[in-house]
Image (cartoon, coloured by chain):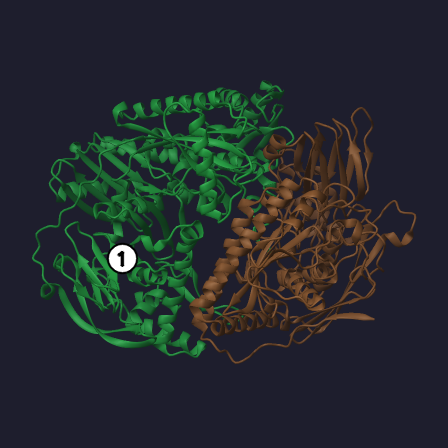
Chain colours: A green, B brown
Amino acid sequence: MQLVGVDVGGTFTDIVLTDTDRNLTVIHKVPTTPDDPSKGVMQGIYELCERNDLDLSGIDHVMHGTTIATNAVLENKGARTGMVTTKGYRDILHIGRHQRPQHYSIMQEIPWQNRPLIKRRHRKTVTERIAARGEVLAPLDEEEVRVAARELKKEGVESIAVCFLFSYIGPSHEDRAAEIVREEYPEAFVTTSSSVTPQFREFERFTTAAMNAFVGPKVRTYVTNLEKSLKDGGLKADLHIMGSNGGVATAGLVADRPVLTLLSGPAAGVLGGAWCGEVAGRDKLITFDVGGTSADIGIVTDGRFGEATARDTWIAGFPLMVPMIDIHTIGAGGGSIAWRDAGGTFRVGPRSAGSEPGPAAYGRGGNFPTVTDANVVLGRLSKDNFLGGEMSLDEEAATRVITDFAKELDLGVHDCAEGILTILNANMANAIRSRTVQKGIDPRDYVLVAFGGAGPLHGVAVAAEMGIREILIPPFPGITSAVGLLTTDHKYDAIRTEFQVQGDVDVARLNRDFESMEKSLSVQLSDEGVSDADVRYERSGDLRYLGQGYELRVEFLGGAINDAAIETAWEQFHAAHLKDYGHNYPDTPIEIVNIRVTGIGVAQKISTPSMATTERSQDLALVKTDSSHFRVNGTLEPFETAYYLRDNLPLDEDIVGPAIILQMDTTTVVPPGATARADQTGNLFIRIGDAT
Amino acid sequence: MTATKSAPPTGDNRPTVDPITASVIQGALESIAIEMGYKLMRMAYSSIIRESEDFGAAIVDIKCRQLCESKQSTPLQSGPIPGYIKGILRTFEARGETIAPGDVIMHNDPYGGSSHGPDVLFAVPVFHKDKLEGFAATTAHHLDIGALSPGSCGIVDAMDVYAEGLQFKAIKVYDKGVKNDMVWHMLRDNIRASHLVVDDMEAQIAAARIGAERYLELIERYSIETVNGAADALMDASERMMRNAIEKIPDGVYKATGHIDGYENSDNPKEKNLPIVVTVTVEGSDITVDLAGTADQIDLPINMPFEGTVDVAIWLTVRSILVDTATFGHVPQNSGLTRPIKILAPKGSLANPNFPAPVIARFAPGCMIADTLMRALSQAVPKQISAGIGNLKVIAFSGLANGQHWVHMEIFEGAYGGRSGMDGMDAVDTLYANTRNNPIEDIETHLPLRVDRYELRENAVPAGKWRGGIGAIREFAFEDSGGYSVEGEGHLFKPWGFQGGHEGEPADLQINPAGGEPYYLPSKLPYRAANTGDKFIAVGPCGGGYGDPLERDPEKVLDDVLDGYIDADVANADYGVVLTAAMEVDLAATARTRKERSAA
């Protein structure tokens, strides 16, 4: 079977093709075509097939990661969107939780007020009301819905969200209203809040539905165009699109619920990192994906990802209630700018020089001291070997900006450069701590998988900061996301709000609900062409102590649920609460807030790589030796440092630090006291301390 | 006689740690406070903590300086923490008692640093090598603290602090690691809805213990000298930041007066229409805020603790204007920022009452101090302020279900005034309060209450070149019998307009009793019984306008008409904007009208 993974980034479109029968994997990179990204995608697939003498029609599946929806939100360029909502509640989207985003600010912006997804003029109210247990307080006035739909059509609205209170427990009014809107205005993109995310908390749910409507038309057009281009181009492959939950879904589903893709970019990175770890036989991984402006951190334990809690997910300042991999993103990367704040404190990031003009070392007029410049000054980035030699670095400019900044701080140039890295690394370590130590996980049991353009530069230092002893650098650190696309399964989520309390649980209802959720997932998966034998379901529940406001995820086993299974869930919840928060309440009753099922259709994956039989030895790999600065036993000093080409490194042979390992898409730093070793799986391992 | 709250001696010690280590330690401290806040909020039971986020978390060093605070918390909760700790230390000293490892100390004394009684602090001392080096502490607003009527808001008829509920003055709830069961029995027996309150207290202790553990790890990693040195550097940097900002203000004296409703229906003239007077003196990089002229203290609980409420209201306002996050980016909050600010308030005034004057309902009056301070500063930094801000209100709903109390405190939002280049923020919590509302779907699922409406006001938009923020209407109905009490402000006085902007709109509250006629309720109302079907209509205030309405971009006026905030007649009357039948701006007619109006 031939699978293609296509990841469209801001600058490049990365393409990976794997042939599972021949155990062959090839990669290619083309510039992204921002006006219509499908052009770049097609061109990339053509070129890749041509170069490798492959037949386009032999491709079975195309797995695609897209940022169309994400960019529409970040650039505030979505559709003109309308809303039909319950009379009396026109401004839920505008008032939000009545909290200001910033405590200490008069001149702040409130995203949902200053740049609303749906303007008030397009928010129509209709008579209807469902109560807390799903009972009808006021029946739906269908005529008012018709009038609203006609008005919205007249106002030039292209997309409509139907959002009623308590629809998560009683969706009938929303469903009927959506039907009427479609009758009146068939061309419109129509969505309901209960179909997007049937969970309580009206502001967050309505916002998620509004977001879905806001990006809907754009994504639908894009997906339709891309499917057509693939077909016209002679491909017979199915198109699948990556979701924020770490699975792929059909193009059709994504066209209907584009909100599911909003944070899919970093999700693919975590999957790619996880796969590299798995291939190397490591089951506890921290993925560390560092680019020019941000670092994404994910935790993978025994092949499972953490999932973000519904209330921790935000985009462009808006809350989002969709299932997604728990990824912690901070503004720290190669382009992060070092600066002094108004009180004189030394800071690094979150502002970044980006790629234009970029760090001073890029020689494009960048004038701020950045992390990349610091790496150049310390000799960790080599002026002639950056990006495989395709781009030369302006060492003089880097030295100038760091020297100027060092003077402001009254520091030596090398001390200042190292300080920039120390502060950046500490910020990144704090981010990792928030997902490990703070959640009862000991990071020292984990391997740090460092990738992205800047991950391997900082991986060892960050690991050392956390007490982590092993670092893994994947074979192609720059295209880990594209690789990740080829490691996914088909994945669909269902969720239902229960509000059932310990001591009074309706077990029959739980069983009924789980079964009906699995049934509907099974339909979706068979539509994908996944056979029943390849499907598995993962059940879980969002539980909390009665009275709390935040839930913790607990697994439920498959099959019929009985009292013993419920007992197990309570015990798991008490344990999870203790682990996550350091405390629990054994005597307080527990409430099942939501139950969830994830339907997973197991898909073919990328083959395990085997290293091409290049000639390899340390001598062959050695490019030069040069001076690079490292701090050992408290003293920062220059070391004679060997620079190697990764492609020629001998397998299973120790490279003792200090060493710098160069490759096309990244540079790996092996400081004194660490040892690197390339292995058969294409991974590079670095150990800190006791070299083996 | 005047109480002086003077800044501690200015820092600017020679730094003992390098700037890199200082920055790294600052990041670590902040991440400790965030973890404390995160865990407290997620463990908490009562909606006032978990949804409204009315809690605080901070690390305080041995000199009682706040090193960091949780950014989820409310300023009025984290800000007072150093004051609480000082109160605890003073109390222990007076009693000749000492603090030992394993202790957990509970404190809520409004004359000993607390903001008011319901905001209970739990402090865990941090010992390093047998020496006390600081505290990790959490505060939270509890549902009930055993006052004369249910809830901990709306106790507006308490005659003194004893009537406001239990007073804890540095009580060890754990003594050298051993739980003091007797105290906990007393709590359970004297507090309504104690199953929630006591579990929330346990959550506070758990979060404070985590903070203490992390702080100790930090000390062990870097040494106490380095951590303290970094703290000095951070405080000095924060102080420098604030001083730089103050220096940009022209030296001078800036004065403003505001009024609070007080008790509208009182026969005693000293209990209503009370003046709040703020005089700001700027000299170089120092600011003095003097509240002389403010009304005398009264025997009702709208007096404000000087330490814990008045100081926080002032720090918050000065910082929000001068070190605005929108301009400065994220600036960690610590005690250094407050060093250049000196606060004076006459002893025996509303802003510096004598024990045992009641203070439990000090929250809305404190917002008026903040707003009046903003008004004074508007003369000095007109582009960094907002016009008058609409004040807040809390209704405490309560009842009995299956023999157990339920209490629900709903905070009703205010609105900001217009700003230079921006309209006011609509329907938000204001100034030192920054809580969240409760989802309607949560309230109705768990309580015998219904929320029948939640929308913005229409045709109540204070005009200005930059219009005032619009208030919200929120309607509540009882689905069972119960009770309620009200604590709020801003029914009688309109938020101030600025530079030609119109005045704002006051708040309003109506009750529509089941089977009766609706009638007006004052902004303060002690506990009353409620029947099934009784309905409340709370109308939020609108902030003042900023600048001449005739200068507002006509397209923005049209937007407000299209969005239903105002109608075409108001567009003409307030803004001189004439709209065509096709709902477009009639530019010629608008220019003409505006010219006539400005000539008039």
* Residue toward you, B121 or A304: B121
Judged left or right of residue B548, residue A25 is left
Residue at 42% across / 60% down in the picture? A427
Query: How many labels sit on residues?
Result: 1
Q: Which residue is mark 1?
A: A470
Residue A430 in view here = yes
* Residue toward you, A361 or A315: A315
Q: What amino acid type is highlighted by mark number 1?
A: Glu
**Location of residue B258 (image quadrant):** bottom right
Is A408 above or below relative to B411?
below
Judged left or right of residue B363, residue B264 is right
The quarter in which the N terminus of chain B is drawn is bottom right
Residue at 74% across / 61% down in the picture? B111
**Location of residue B126 (image quadrant):** bottom right
Residue at 70% across / 27% down in the picture? B479
Where residue A261 appears, as percent x and y from the top left, is: 38, 39
Parent chain of label 1: A
